[in-house]
Amino acid sequence: MATNTEQLSSHESYHEKGQAHVTTLDERRRAALSEIDNAPFSWFHVKVCLVAGVGFFTDAYDIFAINIAATMIGYVYGHTSNQLSTNQSLGVKVATPVGNLVGQLLFGWLADVIGRKRMYGVELMIMIVATFGQALAGQAPAVSAIGVIIVWRFIMGVGIGGDYPLSAIISSEFAATRSRGRLMTAVFAAQGWGNLAAAIVAIIVVQAYKTSIIAAPFPAVVPVDYCWRLLIGLGCVPGVVALYFRLTIPETPRFTMDIERNVAQATADIENVLTSGKHVEEDAIVQRVNAPKASRADFAAYFGQWKNMKVLIGTAYSWFALDIAFYGLGLNSSIILTAINFGNPSGNKSSSLYVYQNLYNISVGNLILSLAGLIPGYWASFLVIDSWGRKPLQLMGFTVLTILFAIMGFAYDALNATTTSKNAFVFLYCLANFFQNFGPNTTTFVIPGEAFPTRYRSTAHGISAATGKLGAVVSQVGFARLVNIGGTNAFVKHIMEIFAFFMLTGIFSTLLIPETKQRSLEDISQEEQDGYIQDAPVER
């Protein structure tokens, strides 16, 4: 009897020790998370911003350079018409968003399963190889150069798509609560500089080949061929520069803690990363714990709750609605400017001088749109996102965009009547670019990187981003099929009206999204954090 009592007492003592150890680890986890959330802004945060931002710079350059390059490729491979056919233009422009969709879903999931660090850099290598491949695309009896470009742009799109969840989550999980919105916005704002760089490089290469283009027989195939290959190919340079830094960035402590379930390792990583900027070797300390683990059943249980599902619906549909207009404008700005005869060259359309003037004007037009709307919009968001909040900023953006697109659509004929009114249309067009970025284009990137638990954060961001790219694909296909109904570019006004409708729907989807400013990622996830580690550690 005494033996049984002693055994029971021994068992209770062991259980109490185990429970005490769990409590200690649970407290250490919350203390470690608090240390990240309250960390002062440091050089390490700057490094994360730069390393992630260079990827987005490259993404935007590669995506939007085709807006200018498509006209150049048309002169080279357009045969008798000197422009790409509707299907060729659609294929070249839509291939990247389709690849984005695949990459966002795939890399978003892999980053939650394998790790942020292990996948970071892989997507950049894909982008570099595919960009270089495009620049070397050639024609053969059995192979169309346009087909080769489309294939490479799809592969490049997979890499670009992978960059969205990875960069968003890494910057989100390393950021302090009070500055997380600004850090993520600064990463995303690199898109504006990439768009601007594409326009500047286009102007430079067109100017560099000016004499050759004008002197060459119409349509100046050889010098224009050099131009588009340089324009596209130079897009891999920033990616090569950033690759080393991406491959050497440390794993986020939240992944180590909540997915690898190694609290001790994560605590050591936080101490090293936030103080010295260095990190210890992986698994230097192995002390696994039992914590909520990603699985199909757990995914269904978490998102089966309306309070969580509505957030995913809100982030995904808001991105879908936004990208209908964002890519509808961004990849077709040359067509829209041509439709209103803004900046079109005068003179003989069958002369090489006209080819030069057309390419130069398109490049300058895209430069103006970047400087007047895109870049200021990103940085306006940067200034207010942590004070106004994400939700008010997104609501304001969708509301203003609804009004702007309605004006551009319903008043299109009046705005296209005189030179002054055409300038007014371009002003409204620049305002639309501004409020896309000073509003939903920024917030649809930021919110999914904050609103979900660590084990599903990257997956949910990938789902939201992929839904957005579905909107981009729908927009491109719709634009290509609708724009010439009733005559060349005659349907542009109705396309603007359609954009206005989708901006209106974005207002309602925004109402499903929580406000995330100045809140810890764990608080936003709507999961109880006290006792998150529930069982005794498994001995290793």
Image: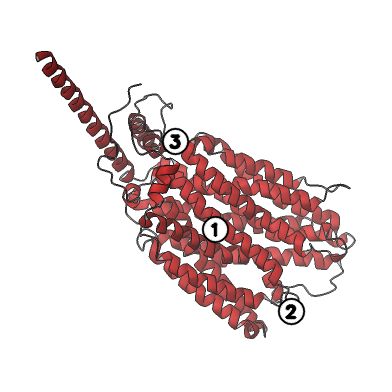
Secondary structure under badge 3?
A: loop
Q: How many C-alpha atoms fall within 10 Å of the one at disc 3: few (<14), some, or many (≥20)? A: many
- Identity of the amino acid at label 3? Glu
Residue 323 position in % (x across, y down):
56, 62
Q: What's the CA distance linking mark 3 and mark 2?
A: 55 Å
Q: Is residue 255 above or below residue 195?
A: above
Mark 2 or 1, nearer chain start: 1
- Identity of the amino acid at label 1? Gly
Question: Is residue 285 found left or right of 369 in the rendered image?
Answer: left
Secondary structure under badge 2?
A: loop
Would residue 74 be visible to someone looking at this image? yes
Q: Is residue 163 above or below residue 192?
A: above
Q: What's the CA distance linking mark 2 and mark 1?
A: 29 Å
Residue highlighted by disc 1: 468
Q: Quadrant of the N terminus?
A: top left
Residue highlighted by disc 3: 251
Residue toward you, 223 or 394: 394
Residue 341 position in % (x across, y down):
71, 76
Please identify the quarter of the rendering in which residue 271 is found.
top left
- Identity of the amino acid at label 2? Gly
Residue sitting at 59 percent across and 42 percent down? Answer: 124
Residue highlighted by disc 2: 486
Question: Is residue 486 found left or right of 494 in the rendered image?
Answer: right
The circle on residue 378 is none
